[in-house]
Amino acid sequence: MATLLHIDSSVFPGEASSSRSVTATFRKVWEEQHPEGTVIYRDLASAPVPHITADAWSAGYTAPAERTPEQSAAFAARVKLIEELEQADAVLIGAPMYNYSIPSTLKAWLDNVLLLGRTAGETPSAQGTPVIAVASRGGSYAPGTPREGYEFVQNYLEAVLKDTLGLDLDFIVPELTMAPRNPAMSELVPLYEASRKRALEDAAARAEELAELLAA
């Protein structure tokens, strides 16, 4: 049966998080399609992975017999994360926008799994794996909006997940999530509600589509 790697990074729990709400919908449909499948779950907010260190980085370019004990320990933690990515038949990532970029915890995970000569390079080890990134944001950074130039989440994730790791990347983008909470954005609430509804529907449809594809 298929394996889903599910990663959340929002600091907000449950329904308080737009990205978690959408990833939860995707996962629910996925598990209905794969009741005997496997879900590898990482909540990077409650259990963050270590930020990359000199030992963890340098160990990737040092022969195993020549690594220090510190390098070996740090690299073993990286390998665990890399193997989870390599084992996955599909990847689901909650990637909310914080201060125009992704959470530092998600950046730390990416820094750990990106290893030249294994997950990156001429033949990335997880190449072709479908990945759904739920890129939620409080406002709108779509083309033509005043803050279009501040959109660093999708651009960055495309460079890393698609161009570097070779994953088959697709985005779901719930936007204007601050509208219900910010009086200055009250007139945008209907647009937020439409965006949320579309994101939840897209998550369910994409989960079912991927489940059918992998079962074929």
Image (cartoon, helix red, strand yellow):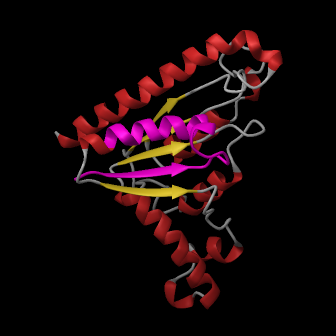
Q: Is residue 11 above or below residue 192?
A: below
Q: Does 90 lie within the magenta span?
A: no
The image quarter containing residue 141 is top right
From the viewer's perspective, is 135 left or right of 123?
Answer: right
Judged from this view, the residue extending furthest toward the right is 184
Of 14 and 136, the residue lying toward us: 14
Q: Is residue 131 above or below residue 171?
A: below
Which residue is pictured at 62% across the width and 38% down the height? 17
Q: Position of residue 120 (x, y in %)?
A: 49, 56
Which residue is pictured at 63% across the width and 62% down the height? 48
Q: Which residues are magenta?
A: 1-30
The image quarter containing residue 51 is bottom right
Judged from this view, the residue extending furthest toward the left is 216
Q: Does 7 lie within the magenta span?
A: yes
Could you tell me which quadrant the C terminus lies in?
top left
Q: Position of residue 151 (x, y in %)?
A: 70, 29
Which residue is pictured at 58% across the width and 87% down the height? 67
Q: Position of residue 194 (x, y in %)?
A: 55, 14
Of 95 and 185, the residue lying toward us: 185
Residue 151 is at least partly visible in this image: yes
Q: Is residue 195 above or below residue 115?
A: above
Q: Position of residue 105 (x, y in %)?
A: 66, 55
Residue 68 is at least partly visible in this image: no
From the viewer's perspective, is 119 left or right of 157?
Answer: left
Number of marks: 0
Q: Is residue 158 above or below residue 41?
A: above
